[in-house]
Image (cartoon, helix red, strand yellow):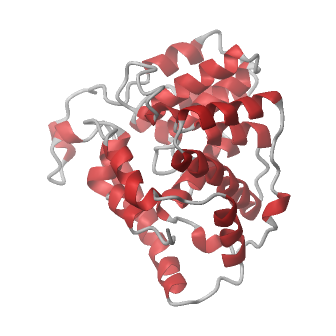
Amino acid sequence: MGSGAEPETAVFSESYGPETRRRRQGEGTHGRSEERIRRRRCGARGPRNPGLGGGVPRRDVAPGGLRQIARGIQIVLRAVPARLRQQLGFRNPRALHFDVDRLPMPDSSTAKAAEELCRGAASPMILDHSLRTYAWATLLGRADGLRPDAELLYVTSLLHDMAITDRYREHAPMPCFAARGGILARDWAKERGWPAPHCASLGDAISLHLNVAVSREHGPEARLLQEGAALDMIGLRLWDLSPGTVAAVLGRYPRHALKRDGPALFLAECHPRTRAHLLSRWLLFPTMTRYAPFDE
């Protein structure tokens, strides 16, 4: 998914955009990040506004949700020509070809601990989805000329779905699993002595990854996590990578039965007025997952 000009966090919460900007400008947070991330209740009701129009009931869409729906439809439609060319056997001459053995694999103590946590709490399907998300994110970053912090991107990728595991599903009292996951990852990193800016960036990126797009102002790690996860789930931007590169990633990290079993995990988190509910009901995310352009 591409990035947009508007800070999309305003659609669901005011917590991340201003905080991220202050942090990147070198200003202190004075505890505001923790307070705001705990206030991030994606299912909380906003002010009533019966004039949303379009025939969509107000109770079914979070404030600003129609804008997210419109952006999501636009993104999916932009991907249709590439999907058709791919199915017809055409090759993208500009696709990134990269030796997957050269992917940077962080081996710091925190990176190793994140992988150990994921292996212990998640199923093999979620573990390999997380590792592929890191691989796709890194490759898309190279294709786009971005230079993310490899350790931060790796830890973010390994922990981004921890809140849907049995062990951590109840970690925080909010319906949005991305927001719960952001709190979990940030607290986990704090306990291991990560710098406060890294902890905040980690929590921000995981909470943002359910948005239909993440803009540049949130940093390359947040943007690439969202795009890497979207590529793995529904095949967005697969056209930007060469078939050989894609095959190498899938050979290293198998998909198991993600197309069959992934939608049920996602639907279990589709609580009313959350981004998961929006993606499922209005953008047909589970259906797109079932028909993703991958063999399993």
- Left or right of residue 5, residue 221 in this image: right
Q: Residue 42, image x and y in percent?
A: 37, 30
Q: Toward which corner of the image does residue 114 lie, by quadrant?
A: top right
- Left or right of residue 93, residue 290 in this image: left
Q: Residue furthest top?
A: 30
Q: Toward which corner of the image does residue 287 lie, by quadrant?
A: bottom left
- Left or right of residue 93, residue 174 in this image: left
The total number of labels drawn is 0
Q: Residue 123, image x and y in percent?
A: 52, 42
Q: Residue 62, image x and y in percent?
A: 29, 37
> Which residue does the image show at 80% across and 47% down from the upper left?
105
Q: Is residue 67 visible?
A: no
Q: Residue 39, image x and y in percent?
A: 43, 18
> Which is nearer the eye, 276 or 51?
276
> Which residue does the image show at 53% across and 23% down from the upper left?
183
- Left or right of residue 205, residue 58 in this image: left
Q: Is residue 186 visible?
A: yes
> Which residue does the image show at 21% across and 41% down from the upper left?
60
> Which is nearer the eye, 292 or 57?
292
> Which residue does the image show at 45% across and 75% down from the upper left?
80
Residue 279 lies, with reference to residue 86, above or below; the image says above
Residue 27 lies, with reference to residue 169, above or below; the image says above
> Which is nearer the eye, 2 or 153?
153
